[in-house]
Image (spheres, rainbow, N blue to C red):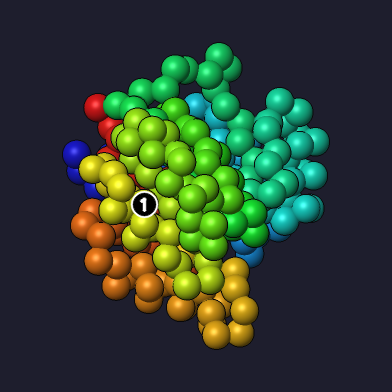
Amino acid sequence: MKLDDLSRFIERLPFASIDHLRPVTQGHQEVILCQGKTPAQVVAIAERLAAASGSFLATRSEPAHRAALAARFPRAEVNELGRTVYLSPDPEPAATGRGTVLIVTAGTSDLPVAEEAAVTARALGNRVERLTDVGVAGIHRVLTQTDALRSAAVIIVVAGMEGALPSVVGGLVPVPVIAVPTSVGYGASFGGIAALLGMLNSCAAGVTVVNIDNGFGAAAAASRINRP
């Protein structure tokens, strides 16, 4: 395909160039990062994506973004905790992944990042399950969930503090584990850097790590692993 031909897949607005080729190049349509955008800009981009595919996913939204999107798209699902807005296709197709993406959180304070991952994984066509508040402070909580852990195709583990939970989970399962450090923790956690370094130094095989608070990136990676 010539470069001139590619231009027909780009819808240009004064503030954005919407990439309608993304389903071919990435396997899913462009996702809206609301951070730094005005509510009007986010709505305009969402309108173009919805017109092209019947759906959109907006992440890192502020209350004003969510209110504007909900007003324009009453059917859209607003996740206040995960800061996402998802308009699913109607009807929503069945999940296409090989298995379940399991989202595991060390503590309740990690839920905002975990919910971003869960909504994203669903929007990308995966079956999603959640396992909440099973951190190492009470390690028996996760040890009693080995059946759920071992039945998943991919596991996303979200943890702050010292970031120990992905190593524990990685030592219990034979499937890929994607670790997400969060900025949850006290002073010496350094806004998630302690958890990030702990996860990068995991001795458990098969653990990979994304950036601090990057639930979206973890879900995108998990979705590619889970494709049939």
Q: Amino acid at mark 1?
A: Val
Residue under the point 72% across and 46% down: 80
Residue 31 position, x and y percent, is 50, 45
The 10 Å Cα crowd at callout 1, few under 14, some 14 to 19, many 20 or more, is many
Determine the secondary structure under disc 1: helix
Residue under the point 30% across and 26% down: 98
Residue 58 position, x and y percent, is 59, 45
Residue on which disc 1 sits: 169
Residue under the point 60% across and 69% down: 184
Is residue 64 visible to us here? yes
Residue under the point 70% across and 38% down: 78
Q: Which quarter shows the N terminus? A: top left
- In the rendered view, would you say 202 is above or below 171? below
Q: Which is nearer the eye, 53 or 170?
A: 170
Q: What residue occupies the far bottom of the structure in this picture?
A: 188
Q: Which quarter shows the C terminus? A: top left
